[in-house]
Amino acid sequence: MQNAKWIKTPLQDKVIENLRVGDKVFLSGRIFTARDAAHKRFMEILDRAGELPIKLSGEVIYYCGPTPSPPGKIIGACGPTTSSRMDSYTPRLLSMGLKGMIGKGKRSETVQKAIVENKAVYFAALGGAGALLSKFVVSSQIVAFEDLGPEAIFMLEVREMPLFVANDIYGGDLYVSGIEKYKIL
Amino acid sequence: MREISVNRIRDEIEEMFIEANFHLPEDQIMALTEALKAEDSDIGREVIELLLKNAEIARLEKIPICQDTGIATVFLEIGQDVHFVDGSLEDAIYEGVRRAYKHGYLRGSCCDPMTRTNTGDNTPPIIHERIVLGDKVKIIAFPKGGGSENYSEVRVFTPADGIEGVKSFVVEMVAKGGPNPCPPITIGIGIGGNLESAPLLAKEALLISYGKRNPDLFLAKLEIEILTEVNKLGIGPQGYGGRITALDVHIKAMPCHIASFPVAVAIQCHAHRFKEKII
Ligand code: SF4
């Protein structure tokens, strides 16, 4: 647990192979926000064989709907939302080359399997630490679905964003192993 | 009789929702500070330290504590000798919320339940009013996040289900939520009344100060018992594993029908934000 690792996006396979559940990771590079409404729209586009507004190959999606940026600030509060609400959409995106996801909370069995199969990784960010997490964002720009307001797709450039590996390619799950240790029967 | 302009209520509401989103109450800071001492898990302590740091950044730099700036919930206790002037009280509250979320750069987190289209200005707020003695108005601005609300529930048990029914219900809800309601959580439990009053009691229970026990000794003991049970789950801060899953449990109870036993569980995240004012 808790080996600190500094990694960059787009995520390379050899970087992903080196990540283990419980590792603390400092992530740098570009990531894209997408939450419920954007995912729903991704599916609608894919169902009619359309093209997604962002290329997913090698990219990382952050389940986040930030608060509006006040004048002079790069972004508002930008912590993670609950990832399980995206579970039904995720395997499809992973099969298209998505390499990483950032959110909070446990993923379904199906998603965990898809993470292993597609050599991807799921990171946990601190839920409810929106002010703190905003300090690691160096640039922010809406790149698609502007009409969705806070649910639009933002391209964020992050520098050393602190995360924990929650699901790795070895089938590990932080939300199981962590809890097992402290559970009192 | 005392006249109060609804414009004053509007301005207070605006200020209070902004304040609530930037300033974590002292009580909650104290609860987290004590949790830091009590937590055994390294990752758990690291999480709590970061949450305290988050609260400090929010306060100093005026960044919302959490990007989920909540559904605007308003509790009003209106003295029966108050006469509101200058327009509709409800419109004034709506306008206060609208202005708070616009001027405070807070996220509109309210949408049509079916189409999911964002209402754009975080209205409508949820308003609870109570008429009390006197000529004062007590306002509580309570921005409530969705992550923890999603693991809150009301159930109408039968009297035979008893206290054990309550305990296992609460433990079930906390276990089901796991990391999703952003632990360490606070738990409000409403017991009695009926289908609509139990959840309201549970929400009001969330507004009780950290560490304050129910004046009824039986319920006070039950609060401690439930807290102990919940903290055996091992979920810990953020669900990464640890001792402190819940910071506190508060119960509010009232009589109910002889045939039923309504119980509501309201879960609140570590970003336990609200602001109270009497005018
Ligand atoms: S549950 Fe609370 S702390 Fe977590 S994201 Fe929602 S509002 Fe923020």
Image (cartoon, coloured by chain):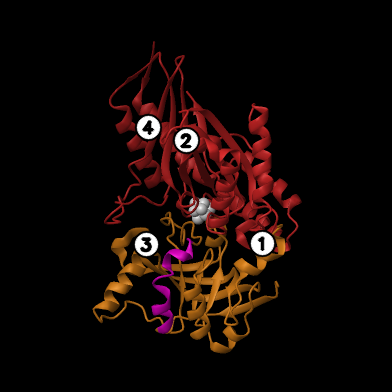
Chain B: its colour in the image is: red
Callout 2: 10 Å neighbours few (<14), some, many (20+)?
A: many
Q: CA distance from mark 1 to mark 4?
A: 43 Å
Residue at label 3?
A151
Asked whether B273 or B13 is in front, the reply is B273
Which region is colored magenta? Answer: A81-95
Quarter that holds the C terminus of chain A: bottom right
Chain A: its colour in the image is: orange
Residue at the image point whose x is 64% and y is 50% from the top:
B230
User: Residue B10: which numbered mark, if any?
Assistant: 4
Mark 1 sits near ligand 1, with its Cβ under 8 Å away: no
- Where residue A12 appears, x then y in whole percent? 53, 87
Q: CA distance from mark 1 to mark 3?
A: 30 Å
Is label 2 in a helix, a strand or a loop? helix
Residue B184 vertical placement versus A119 (above, below): above
Q: CA distance from mark 3 to mark 4?
A: 28 Å
Is label 4 in a helix, a strand or a loop? helix
The type of residue carrying mark 2 is Ala
Q: CA distance from mark 3 to mark 2?
A: 33 Å
